[in-house]
Image: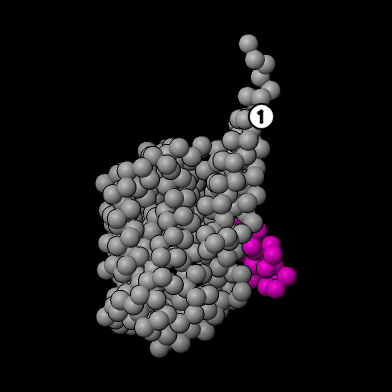
Amino acid sequence: MTMGLGCIVCSLRTRMPVTMAWSTPGAALLATTGAAAGGFAGAVGAFAVCGVLLALCGAVPWLEKLVERIPAALASAMLAGILLTICAKPFIDLPRAPWQIGCVLLAWLITTAFARRWAVLAALVVIGVDGAFSRTGATTLAPHLEFVTPHLDATAMVAIALPLFLVTMTSQNLPGVAVLASFGYRLGLRKPLLYTGAAGVAGSVAGAHAINLAAISAALAAGPEAHPHRDRRWIAGVACGVVYVALAPASAAVVAVALVAPQGLLAAVAAVALFGTFAAAAASALEPVATREAAAVTLVVAGSGVTLGGVGSAFWSVVAGLLVLGVGAVARRRATPKQ
């Protein structure tokens, strides 16, 4: 619900395709952290503190300037690298579920030839071919919301709040702004961080670990697949928010369908939705000759999925690309004859 409202409000106010999400690297971090000190209430307290830290970042002016200085080619390369792993997933999983994943790919391919805009929807409908909807029990479809009183525990702050804040900023918020910038949208970080931080605090009492700017879905809404004209793509951000709000009461049903669907089926639908965006990002990244090598390194590092110090590959890919750019600039200066 907080994600959906954020998409709607920010897209309407900025006339940009702003999309929000939960912290995917944050979820991976929590999955490997183990039980929090102070129990689940201690974890909820850490989630709330993370939200406060994100909101405070909205008041840091130099953060916006730092993101704006990332070259567009490297931002596009980072996006292409992130999308590469997703787009390759159905072909990796194809031997495990050839019939189901094959039907998704075939539905997308055939519909693309006749009605390209509806191709992804056609692939999504194929999920019902395996009977996933019929295998969900009625009791699993009713959502249940339980509020938890946050407990502030010093150990949980160090083990959860600070790492969650770090990975959310470096692997979600910064790439999210960079992705929008690669499509020509200068969003800035202040207002989105103020909202996502406040939403994170509000959602924490119901178990939400962090709300942030989206990166992958931002590429879908901001790219040419959403609308040929860039100034009309904000409607995709609003549409994304409306669907999130509609799915909020049905969240338990969504999870139930995802659990009974064959492995790789939902990933295949996500992949076909992102093929066009990946192609556009890769072409934009590698087109400028001057930054081509740095962009290639950025793409490869982002696609590697490497995690160092708890920080994901999206952040390190930009660092690697900037290093290559810097070394190239030094080499060119040394090669230039002195007057």
Main SS category, magenta section = helix
Q: Give the image location of residue 92, x and y in percent.
A: 69, 65
Q: Can residue 129 be seen in this view?
A: yes
Q: Which residue lies furthest to the top in this view?
A: 339
Location of residue 293 (image quadrant): top right
The residue range painted magenta reads 84-106
Front residue of 177 and 48: 48
Look at 32% across and 67% down and name the residue there.
Answer: 49
Q: Who's the residue at 62% across and 30% down the image?
A: 330
Q: Quadrant of the N terminus?
A: bottom left
Name the spot of residue 173 as percent of width and height, x first.
42, 53
What residue appears at the point 29 percent right and 55 percent down from the top-left corner? Answer: 56
Query: Residue 97: x percent and y percent?
Result: 68, 73
**Residue bearing the label numbered 1:** 331
User: How far across and how far down the image is residue 303, in percent?
Assistant: 62, 54
Q: Does the magenta stretch include residue 19?
A: no
